[in-house]
């Protein structure tokens, strides 16, 4: 996995790691609230893992790991492979990624506030999320093709 992000984007994303460490579960919980207004998307998720808080906690950990390693994505290869496998098992498709971004980015601002989650921070996260989504979509496409 090679980073295609600008040095400014990398620096901004890395700078958010402390806030993500402190507020990550709150952000992912808020993201899922936004995401689950769509019953079809909600049905893709294990609701027991949602209710127990396990899924928001796992996702918060993954987002934090991404922020901390955005400049050395090879450290995340195993985690990305596991995530891609799980996505294929649950039927995640390329068209779901923009929906998640539309829930995640406002959730970051909801929790951290506009003073911390500035337009510049959200733009950097949008770029970084887009790159990661492209990586996952590529891995998942290969897995879907193998399964067919």
Image (tube, rainbow, N blue to C red):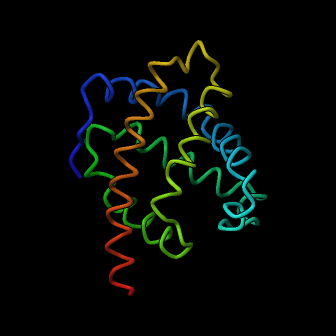
58 over 107 or under it: above or below: below
Q: Is residue 28 left or right of residue 36?
A: left
Rendered residue at 38%/29% (across/down): 14
| Residue 15 placement: quadrant | top left
Rendered residue at 48%/65% (across/down): 93
122 over 66 or under it: above or below: above
Rendered residue at 33%/55% (across/down): 135
Q: From the top left corner, tell me how far across and down residue 133 is, in percent.
A: 40, 51
Q: From the top left corner, tell me how far across and down residue 16 is, in percent.
A: 47, 27
Query: Residue 48 or 9: which is nearer the viewer?
Result: 9
Of all residues, the one furthest to the bottom in this rendering is 148
97 over 107 or under it: above or below: below
Q: Is residue 53 left or right of residue 77?
A: right
Total numbered labels placed on residues in the image: 0
Query: Residue 15 or 100: which is nearer the viewer?
Result: 100
Rendered residue at 24%/26% (across/down): 7
Looking at the rendered image, the quarter that the C terminus falls into is: bottom left
Of all residues, the one furthest to the top in this rendering is 115
Q: From the top left corner, tell me how far across and down residue 17 is, in percent.
A: 46, 31
Q: From the top left corner, tell me how far across and down residue 90 is, in percent.
A: 56, 72
């Amino acid at each position: 996995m090679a980073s295609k992000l600008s040095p400014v984007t990398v620096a901004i994303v890395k700078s958010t790691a402390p806030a993500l460490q402190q507020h990550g579960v709150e952000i992912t919980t808020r993201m899922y609230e936004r995401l689950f207004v769509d019953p079809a998307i909600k049905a893709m998720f294990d609701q027991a893992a949602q209710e127990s808080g396990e899924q928001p906690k796992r996702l918060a950990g993954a987002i934090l790991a991404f922020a901390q390693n955005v400049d050395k994505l090879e450290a995340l290869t195993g985690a990305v492979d596991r995530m891609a496998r799980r996505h294929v098992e649950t039927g995640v498709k390329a068209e779901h990624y923009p929906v998640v971004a539309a829930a995640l980015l406002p959730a970051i601002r909801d929790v951290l506030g506009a003073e911390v989650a500035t337009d510049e921070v959200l733009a950097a996260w949008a770029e970084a999320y887009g790159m990661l989504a492209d990586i996952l979509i590529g891995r998942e496409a290969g897995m879907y093709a193998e399964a067919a």
